[in-house]
Image: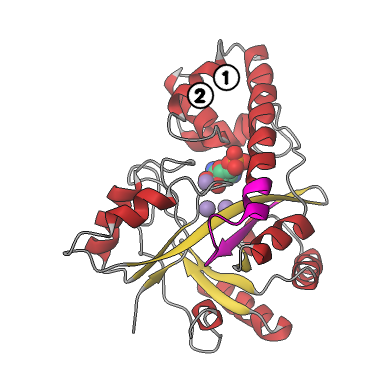
Amino acid sequence: MLKYDLHCHSHFSDGGHSPEELVGFAKQAGVDVLALTDHDTVSGLNSLHEAIQKPEVNLQIINGIELSVRWKKYDIHVLGLNIDKDAPELLQLIEKQKNCRVSRAKQIAEKLEKIGLKDAYEKAKRLAAHGLISRPHFAAVLLEEGITSTMQQGFDRYLKRGKVAYIPTQWANLEEALRAVKAAKGVGVLAHPLKYGLTQSKLRELIETFKAWGGQGIEVISGEIMPDQVALLVKLCQQFNMYASTGSDFHHTMSSRIKLGGQGTLPLNCTPIWQSWAV
Ligand code: AMP
Ligand code: MN
Ligand code: MN
Ligand code: MN
């Protein structure tokens, strides 16, 4: 059986490592199939493909992306897997998301200036040297400046929904995101469904809408997940007739508790997402 990790990040978004380093980690962990799913960008995919050209590397790459989506008052993440990274409609959406990200970062920085953090935008931009600014970069600046003592505290005190530097952002909606994934010949997967703080009935409503717009998968295994959560997600896959996906959501060796490829395996009573692209 092949080992899959269909969700991870590089320094082209909020991850700490280059695509080349990710290939090294994948090799160490015995991963056979890897999807790079940076937030709202496909910029890391070319170097990832280059990195597997060496003869000693035996790794299959699935092109991916993790799109930020606004659904009601929630920020939802949609994975596009097995995408054509050059598809014009996808690239158009990426451009829109990029602009959203830049203006959001400026607004977050303004809020943080008010609590005494000087030049927050420039500092976060410096940390996001390879890619776009995301909230973990601000969390890292808060930590560096001694305003917080962990990255998590940055989210809990300032950056997460309801806190002073949280900016509601007009990301793509579900329809736009799933249309772009489809235009890129990929499959849409609802990432880490239990991380949005939704009630069971709201989650069902989300999955229904997700499916109605063409989404085909649910991420059943995501990083560290409890057995009862896996059971719930398998049940939802069965009820809504969706494929199941698995990924570590690895970001960084320093901050991620789980290694690349370190997530559990998919239970047998669900249909793996790779069956959707198997020939
Ligand atoms: P952004 O796309 O800029 O909104 O940043 C989202 C990223 O921040 C996620 O992919 C996680 O890596 C991280 N993140 C989001 N919420 C939290 C949280 N509550 N605690 C810690 N990290 C978080
Ligand atoms: Mn992230
Ligand atoms: Mn996510
Ligand atoms: Mn992710």
Q: Which mark is residue 121?
A: 1
Estimate the x, y position of residue 276 in percent, counting from the top left: 56, 81
Residue sticking out furthest to the left: 56
In the rendered image, the vertical position of residue 232 relative to residue 8, given as above or below = below
Q: CA distance from mark 1 to mark 2?
A: 6 Å
Q: Residue at x 76, y 58 (%)?
A: 174
Amino acid, disc 2: Lys
Secondary structure under the numbered disc 1 in the rendered image = helix
In the visual, does 277 lie left or right of 53? right
Estimate the x, y position of residue 270 in percent, counting from the top left: 56, 85
Q: Which is nearer the eye, 185 or 58? A: 185
Q: Magenta segment range?
A: 76-93
Amino acid, disc 1: Tyr
Q: Residue at x 52, y 17 (%)?
A: 122
In the rendered image, the vertical position of residue 114 relative to residue 45, given as above or below = above
Estimate the x, y position of residue 222 in percent, counting from the top left: 51, 64
Instruction: Say whether residue 148 is visible.
Output: no
Quadrant showing the N terminus: bottom left
- Residue 17 location, quadrant: top left
Estimate the x, y position of residue 171 in percent, counting from the top left: 73, 44
Q: Which is nearer the eye, 269 or 225? A: 269
Q: Which residue is mark 2?
A: 125
- Residue 27 location, quadrant: bottom left
Q: Which mark is residue 103?
A: none
Q: Check whether the beta carbons of the residues at disc 1 and disc 2 lie within 8 A of each other.
A: yes
Instruction: Say whether residue 137 is visible.
Output: yes
